[in-house]
Image (cartoon, helix red, strand yellow):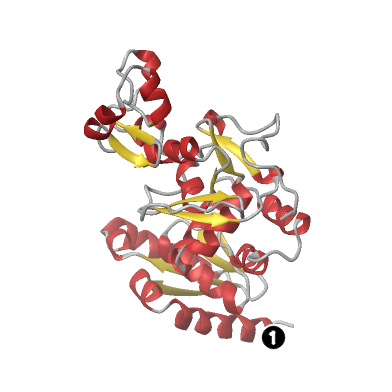
Amino acid sequence: MTANSTPASQGHSAGSTPASQGHSAGSTPTSQGHSAGSTPTSQGHSAGSTPTSLRELVASGLHPSTVSRRFTRVLPTVHMRGEPSTMDRCRAISLWRPDAVLSHRSAAYLRGWTTEPSTLDATVPRTARLRPPSWLRLHRRALDSRLVDEVESLPCTTPAQTMLDCLAVLPREEAELLIDERLKFGLDPASLICLLERFPGRRGNTELARQVRLAVTRFASEPERAFGRALHRIGPYLEMNATVGSFVCDLVDRRSRTIIEVDGREFHSAGEVFSKDRRRQNALVLGGRLVLRYSAFDVLAAPDVVAAEIASVVRRRRESRR
């Protein structure tokens, strides 16, 4: 962070990401993020159908007492008709504090990375003295203008900064799943490394670097992802969903000629699939490879135990092939 960082309202560069580009392929579209009555006033709805400042409501002809009786107070000086959606709350934050930047879980939600969080986050200047409601967590810090973007016309941290922030507030398993999924579906790992190099020594950098190193991006199922994570923690690194001859195998170590398959009962117990698995395994074994099969249940129940067994086998076979 720089000491003289630019506030969010002044820090947007000309090349900030427009709303239509801010969400990934599986993101939550705007129509799902807004409540039924959240169409902007300019399209014919009465004042306050979206989060609106008290000043605007009074200017539209409403008396303050009418606002207090008939409108929901979303944040101090921000009201709307009905109950606010998560998207309404995000907009209310920006109305309440124009110098706030949506960050952490708020930014992840805006980018379509997560479902609606129970707690929203915003970054405000260190000098801000505010009492947020229970659903909002404020982070007081100086935020460099290069780390601020726009999504849905709202100030929001860049993808790389959002990931760094999420690692700090999410439970470990959720954070690992988030970074694995984002790297799999388009987040450039180089942007994360660039963030570390541009702002060295920051809190959270060490954990972000570790997560980039341990990330699993070629998984086809949750058991494969959990297994890959466990292997990365202890080494060695195996190829995931790699081609061996005419087959695509779950995990492959070419040096030791070892193949690992993780089988889910609901898929691999079907008669045709079961027979195909046997034929494929026979072909791989006859080709001089060791094929080890594990159930998805065992992998999810004890991924570290299974990973330790595989690592031992792979290292022993590598040594014997020297």
Q: Residue at x 38, y 48 (%)?
A: 115
Which of the 4 quarters of the picture holds residue 84? top left
Outermost residue on the left side: it is 69
* Amino acid type indicated by mark 1: Glu
At mark 1, the secondary structure is helix
The quarter of the image holding the C terminus is bottom right
Viewer-closest of 239 and 20: 20
User: Position of 84 compared to 174: left or right?
Assistant: left
Q: Quadrant of residue 79?
A: top left
Q: Nearer the viewer, residue 254 or 76?
A: 76
Q: Where is the N terminus found, in terms of image quarters? A: bottom right
Task: Judge by depth and name the residue closer to the eye, 279 or 266.
Answer: 266
Q: Is residue 40 visible?
A: no
Would you name the residue on which mark 1 appears? 319
Query: Residue 201: image x %, image y %?
Result: 74, 66
How far from the left and from the top, in percent, is residue 52? 39, 29
User: Given the current orientation, which residue lies at the most extreme top position?
Assistant: 44
Whole-percent x and y of residue 6?
Answer: 70, 43
For the residue carrying disc 1, how many other residues have a C-alpha within 10 Å: few (<14), some (14-19), or many (20+)? few
Residue at the image position 42 percent from the left and 37 percent from the top = 92
User: Residue 289, percent across and down?
Assistant: 56, 73
Q: How many marks?
A: 1
Q: Is residue 308 above or below residue 49?
A: below
Quadrant of residue 267 within the rendered picture: bottom left
Would residue 239 be seen by someone viewing this image from the given angle?
yes
Q: Note whether 175 is above or below 182 in the view shown.
A: below
